[in-house]
Each structure stands twice: as C-alpha cells, then as structure tokens.
Amino acid sequence: MTETVTPPVLVTRRLADGVLDRLAPPAVTLHDSEQPMARAELLAALPGRTAVITTLDDRVDAEFLAAAGPGLRIVANHAVGTHNIDLAACAERGVLVSNTPGVLTEATADLAWALLLAATRRLGEGERLLRSGRPWAWAPTFMLGMELAGTPLGILGMGRIGQAVARRAAGFAMPVGYHNRSRLPADREAGARPLPLDRLLAESRVLVVTCPLTDATRHLVDAERLAQLPPGAVVVSMTAGVVDERALAAALASGHLFAAAVDNFEHEPAVHPDLLAQERAVLVPHLGSATVRTRQAMGGLAVDNVLAVLAGDPPLTPVV
C-alpha cells in the first residue's frame, strides 16, 4: 500500500497568476478559491505542514498551531498586517512569521489619493446620480466639492504608506503634518511636520489614516477625536479598526465632516450599515493593494519567505 505524503506547503487562498510556479506542484496544497477556507477545513488541512501561506482572514492562534503540529516552521502572511496572527503563541512554539512589507506601498498610497479625490469632489454621489436616471442639470451651485490645493493634510501613521502619501501631497502644494509613535529621520519625513495627535487633528482639513491596527490603535479615532477635526474636514481610512465606523457615520450624518472614504472595514466583508446610509461616504472593498503587479509581488515575497525557511535560511521579511 502506498503511503500518502502530505505536501509540506499549504496555501489557503488562490494567489495571483504565476506566484506559485516556483513551488513544485507535489509540494503544495492550494485552496483554489477566492473565498477563505472554513475554519474546520483549515484545521483539518494543517497536520503535517511545514509552511502555510495565509491571508488576513486566516486566524493563526494556539488552535491553529496545535493542529499543524511540531513540524510547522513558518507562517507566511500574504499581507503587511499581522493582526490575524497570535505572534506570542508562534514565538513560544518556535514558528517563524513573515509578512509582505514594501511591495504594496505605492499601490496603497495611490488608492488613498484616489479615495481622497473621490470624497472631496463627490464622485461617488455624481456617478450614482447619473446611473439612477434621475433628471439633473448643470448649475453654478450643483454638487460643489472641496479643493485640495493648499489644504492642510494630516497623516496618522507615518510608515512606508504614510510617507508615500506625503510625497504625493507635494503635487497639490498641501502642507503636511503627521503623528507617529516616534519621529522619523528628516530625510524620510517628505517635508511633513511631526505633531502631537491633538494638534494634528485640530489643524488637518484632510486626515489620512494609515497606522497599523494594534491594541493601542483600535478605535483610536473615535467620536471624541473626530470632533477635534475642523468642521468640514475629510477622513480617509486605509486601516480597518483604527477609525470607529459608527462614529465616522455619525460625524457625517451631523454634517461635522464634509466627506469620508474607507478601504478596509473592521468586520469585513460586512460594512457598518450606518456608513452605507451616508451619501458622502466613499466605500471600496479593500482595494489598497489590488493591482496585478502588486499582488504578484506580495505573493512572490510570501513564496520567497517559505523557500528561504525550507532551505534552512531565515525569512526575508520576518515578523517573529
């Protein structure tokens, strides 16, 4: 009787074309779907694996690690964020964790600006109006938006993406402030001024949120902090869970905010119903890194991390 051998690598979601070509097919089990694996299915597929390429929908915790067993050497997360992973549990078991930083910076910053322009110029409202078939006519007061040139921009979280957002602001002659856990070296500030959070909020007509989700940043931008923004401000949220979605919807409904835009949602794929009800909310389904080149680069980096560890080397982009 031929013994069944479990392939060492499990990939929990379909990846961009060509990404898995460097992993020989017998070495990989692929969940060939755009939908995440059901929890029971994932746990059943883990025993005997040496490496797992995960996405943000896969919860990596003590149960996951126990199901995989002592042979698991690396969890390669197909994302920059790692809030789906219990890093302490992985470290305790000696399981390495990697992510995919850097390769999605420019695409995500591009989308932040796309959302900012869509929100300030009311593009979502305008398109919905035309598609509805309702009558309309140009008028001097029709669907007036907000200009960005010279408008103060605040960036909450000045990592790679925040810095890329700041660089793009030069084209709009926008003064930029930022709040970060620590001040950046001057050559990485892209002309932005470091500010305490309260002052950043008070001075920013536009706030772009790019800081990672942690226990310290969850709902950091709540109703109280949204109220600190000037009346008529705009908020662009690129990180799930940092901006309180219910509070954001309330600030739009009250008229305190001119508009808002959100790419990541705290309980994806669900979107808070209060946000869905707001005409001035531009809502997109987690598209920050959604370009062909970027998704191929993310998948390629995840594979590079797996191949390095399987060869006895450290991962290229370790988290743990």
Image (cartoon, grey):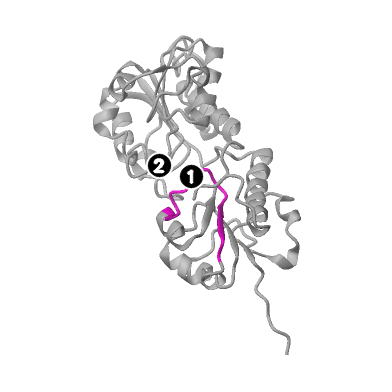
Name the residue: 46% across, 63% down.
93
In front: 89, or 203?
A: 89
Based on the displayed image, in which of its 4 quarters is residue 153 positioned?
top left
Residue 133 vs residue 215, the one in the foreground: 215
Please name whichever residue, 300 or 316, is drawn nearer the observer in this view of the structure. 316
Which numbered disc covers residue 213?
2
Residue type beneath disc 2: Leu
The reply to whether the magenta stretch includes residue 86 is yes
Q: Which mark is residue 81?
A: 1
Q: Determine whether label 1 and label 2 are within 8 Å by CB.
A: yes
95 versus 256 height, above or below: below
Spot occupied by residue 96 in the image (x, y as percentages of width and height): 53, 55
Vertical order, 88 against 171 (above or below):
below
- The one nearer the camera, 74 or 101, is 74
Residue 280 falls left or right of residue 79:
left
Mark number for residue 201? Answer: none
Q: Is residue 224 left or right of residue 305?
A: left
Residue 126 in sight from this viewpoint = no
The residue located at (48%, 44%) in the rendering is: 81
Res. 131 in view? yes
| CA distance separating discs 1 and 2 | 8 Å
Residue 73 percent coordinates (x, y): 56, 61
Residue 253, quarter of the rendered image: top left
Q: Which residue type carries mark 1?
A: Gly
